[in-house]
Amino acid sequence: MNPEKSHLHPSKQKRQFAGCVELIPLHPVCIEFIDSHCLWGFPMAHLADLVFEKNPEHHGNKTLPPDQLVLQYRRHKVIIKGWRLELLAGPLIAGRVARVHAEKHLGPLMIEEAWVSEIHVVPIGNPGLPATPVEIPIKKP
């Protein structure tokens, strides 16, 4: 041990890793989709399919988003519309996206970033699920 460094004030010493175990930050388990009405959360491991395509509503209209990204989960389909959405595919597949937020009004555009203008979450019909929520009666003692 260097005696010169041991006499430094604690605020001036550079603290190194001093334990036996160093923890890394947890990877998110769910991905959040936030639109103007709701926050949706889906487990990242439940992403079954991802399709990047042209927005069928675009038709050359420069004010509408040209890209569409469709994410298929077990019971829902998430439709994302925006610009440069192909940049989301790799991070989505790698499980690195924790949150996707729809922003209607264009702000400062970053050329290397995707811009999401719309998020639509559509339930997928499943004949095994009831059409209405099942109420569980609560018995009072």
Image: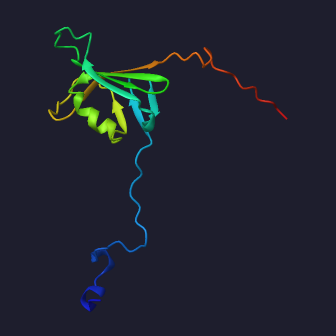
* Front residue (pair 138, 92): 92
- Please, which colouring scheme is shown? rainbow
Q: Position of residue 88 (x, y in %)?
A: 27, 33
Q: Is residue 90 left or right of residue 128?
A: left
Q: How many marks?
A: 0
Is residue 6 positioned above or below 116 on the image? Answer: below
Is residue 81 positioned above or below 3 on the image? Answer: above
Using the rendered view, name the quadrant where residue 21 is placed: bottom left
Which residue, as the protein is rendered here, is positioned at the far right? 141
Q: Quadrant of the C terminus?
A: top right
Q: Position of residue 84 (x, y in %)?
A: 20, 27
Is residue 16 positioned above or below 62 on the image? Answer: below
Q: What residue is shown at x 72% (from left), y 26% (from top)?
A: 136
Q: What residue is shown at x 27% (from left), y 91% (from top)?
A: 3
* Front residue (pair 22, 2): 22
Q: Position of residue 87 (x, y in %)?
A: 22, 33
Q: What residue is shown at x 44% (from left), y 38% (from top)?
A: 45
Q: Quadrant of the N terminus?
A: bottom left
Q: Is residue 37 visible?
A: no
Q: What residue is shown at x 75% (from left), y 26% (from top)?
A: 137
Using the rendered view, name the quadrant where residue 79 is placed: top left
Using the rendered view, name the quadrant where residue 126 is placed: top right
Which residue, as the protein is rendered here, is positioned at the far bottom? 3
* Front residue (pair 141, 120): 120
Q: Is residue 12 visible?
A: yes
Q: Position of residue 100 (x, y in %)?
A: 34, 32
